[in-house]
Amino acid sequence: MEYNRHRVHESFIYTWFSTIAAVLQFKVVSCALMKAIVKYLAGLAGPSGYGSKSTAEQVTQHCSLSSTSSPSSTLTAIITGATSGIGAETARVLAKRGVRIIIPARDRKKATLVKEKILKESPEADITLLEIDLSSFASVKRFCTEFLSLGLPLNILINNAGKFSQKLEYSEDKIEMTFATNYLGHFLLTEMLLEKMVETAAETGIEGRIVNVSSVIHHWVKRNHFSFSQMLNPSNYNGTRAYAQSKLANILHAKELSRQLKERKANVTINAVHPGIVKTGIIRDHKGFITESLFFVAAKLLKSTSQGAATTCYVAVSPQTEGMSGLYFSDCNQCHSSSLANDEAVALKLWKLTRSLIRRRSHYTVA
Ligand SMILES: NC(=O)c1ccc[n+]([C@@H]2O[C@H](COP(=O)([O-])OP(=O)(O)OC[C@H]3O[C@@H](n4cnc5c(N)ncnc54)[C@H](OP(=O)(O)O)[C@@H]3O)[C@@H](O)[C@H]2O)c1
């Protein structure tokens, strides 16, 4: 039992490190790839002027986000998963830049600590804590109803919360936990808040932005393993595969919703990002001698939390990303997602299946 637990913990870590190993060991090291690795390690800037070593503070430095004229011009952002790691850093930096922050959290105590920490640094920050469990349709609905009743505008939605479940677990809606949390919860959240975002953008003339925090691990998903019914209720569970599938679904969600938003000429964009590899809670839980040793060896390849939050902040508020939608970013630059993630037909199919599932299970009528 203990052995199994360690094996699953480590398989997740190996997924990342074996990518690096594959790159180093085999002849797949093309010139372009080699250049990309050197660029990453050296933190060289890409076309955006930023690179792997840019921090969230740096990429938001020249963004004028705070309200100069009236409180109604203050940007409002919802950031899921802001009780720790990349999300907490994203909230800290955006609050410092004058953005009103809404933190939906399942752990009130952790959320209060994050709020207190932000207020210590930015006493003027406007932070509201609300309850959510993204793995539960009912909880997501409750959160949306509560948020919408506050009568606030909504400019930015950062779908950042993430879970990696080592063993097969089910949500209260009887759906595999990783898929329910990382993808379905965020899908419903976005659906229920979308009209508020479109309305806010139309009223203020400020582009609304949605950011789905995905992962480079989505490249691992093979076409024949991407089955909706299997993701809901896997017959042969593998934690790393489930996580990768949920992260692929985050990108496909961004692609299809972006297409729909463009079609209706809504002033709201949606993109997906890979934050980089950061030793946050999602990895820290995976303890073990081998895991720790791997981290020790690969410490130089990891990003700091502030570097990890940079791409999200860049896509969420930089004037450079204005009008960009349906794209995938890493190290604060647009980059390529997998061919499966770029497949419009797969994105549309996933969208339809998700909507029909949500309609059946959550009693939420999507327009
Ligand atoms: N760290 C990396 O190397 C890495 C690499 C690629 C992508 N990412 C992605 O980056 C995002 C942020 O992850 P992180 O690394 O910052 O991990 P983290 O420190 O573990 O943070 C995860 C956050 O998600 C929240 N969360 C988990 N399940 C939830 C649920 N059911 N309802 C509401 N909130 C829930 C957690 O809340 P609690 O405090 O209640 O647990 C926490 O705030 C994730 O989407 C992850 O997949 C991370």
Image (spheres, rainbow, N blue to C red):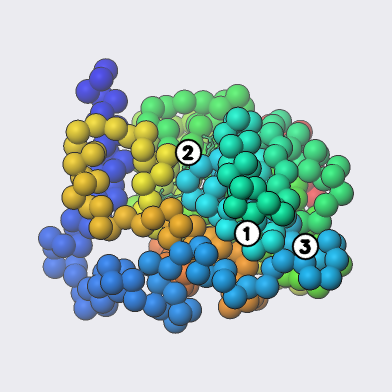
Which numbered disc, 3 or 1, marks the residue that appears first in the sequence? 3
Cα gap from disc 3 to disc 1, whole angstroms = 13 Å
Question: Relative to residue 356, is residue 290 drawn left or right?
Answer: left
Amino acid marked by disc 3 = Thr
Residue at the disc numbered 3: 74
Where residue 112 appears, x then y in whole percent? 63, 36
Q: Residue at x 63, y 42 (%)?
A: 115
Depicted 5 relative to depicted 205: above or below: above
Where residue 80 appears, x then y in whole percent? 61, 45
Residue at the disc numbered 1: 96
- Foreground disc of the pair 1, 2: 1
Mark 3 neighbour density, 10 Å: few (under 14) some (14–19) many (20 or more): some
Residue at the disc numbered 2: 163
Mark 2 neighbour density, 10 Å: few (under 14) some (14–19) many (20 or more): some
Which numbered disc, 1 or 2, marks the residue that appears first in the sequence? 1
Q: How many marks?
A: 3
Cα gap from disc 1 to disc 2, whole angstroms = 27 Å
Given residues 279 and 21, the one toward you in this image is 279
